[in-house]
Image (spheres, rainbow, N blue to C red):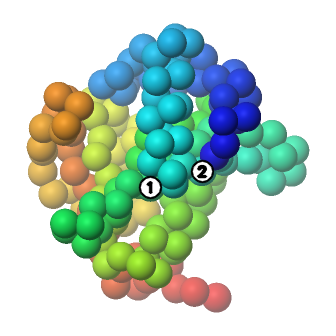
Amino acid sequence: MEASHLEPLFAVASDPKIWEQHPKWDRYKREVFERFFNECLGFGSALVIRDAKTKQLIGSSTYKVDPTRNQIEIGWTYLARAYWGGRYNGEAKRLMLAHAFRYFPRVVFRIGPNNLRSRRAVEKIGAVLLGEERGADGFTHVVYKIDSGDFWSQNPTP
């Protein structure tokens, strides 16, 4: 992700339906989204998600390293609603997981407890619920994990 991606990503993120199950439900607002976008840029590991056919930006996702636990988090993911319910989220997560497992034995996902869409999506790719924790952002999240061996047993390389 680069600073120049702000406008096309805000065009996607300005849809309130994208954020309605999220603890930070108001990210569709310009000033709130800009803070979120800059936070993701600050991680140095945010990625844009493109439609392979049109090359249009349809969302983004981010890695965040936790060196104290030798794991990486994947999160901050959103997609344009036209891409919900299909293969896009799962495909993006599988690509990110395959890359992450080159360097880390475990990936975690922190999700708002009421974000049922995101919870189902990570369960579909084999993530297992660990429990709840209060995040640095002050919100309670459910934490899912997937370990390298579990991922590769479900997603063998071609």
Report the Cα–Cα distance between label 1 and label 2. Answer: 8 Å
Kind of residue at badge 1: Tyr
Q: Are marks 1 and 2 in contact (CB under 8 Å)?
A: yes
Between 125 and 100, the residue placed more toward the observer is 100
Q: Identify which residue is drawn at 33% across, 33% down.
A: 115
Mark 2 neighbour class, 10 Å CA radius: few under 14, some 14 to 19, many 20 or more: some
**155 above or below 144?**
below
**Residue 23's spot in the image, x, y percent?**
30, 25
Residue 143 as seen in the image, left or right of residue 11: left
**Residue 24's spot in the image, x, y percent?**
35, 22
Quarter assignment of residue 141: top left
Q: Identify which residue is drawn at 46% across, 81% down.
A: 102
Q: Identify which residue is drawn at 59% across, 24% down.
A: 13
Query: SS of the residue at dot 2?
Result: strand
Residue 50 as seen in the image, left or right of residue 138: right
Q: Identify which residue is drawn at 27% across, 61% down.
A: 66
Whether residue 150 is visible here, answered yes or no, is: no
**Residue 18's spot in the image, x, y percent?**
51, 25
Query: SS of the residue at dot 1?
Result: strand
Residue 99 as seen in the image, left or right of residue 113: right
**56 above or below 143?**
above
Mark 1 neighbour class, 10 Å CA radius: few under 14, some 14 to 19, many 20 or more: many
Q: Which residue is mark 1?
A: 63
Quarter placement of the C terminus: bottom right
Kind of residue at badge 2: Leu
Between 123 and 139, the residue placed more toward the observer is 139
Q: Which residue is mark 2?
A: 47
Residue 96 as seen in the image, left or right of residue 23: right
Whether residue 50 is visible here, answered yes or no, is: yes
**12 above or below 91?**
above
Quarter assignment of residue 146: bottom left
**Residue 49's spot in the image, x, y percent?**
66, 47
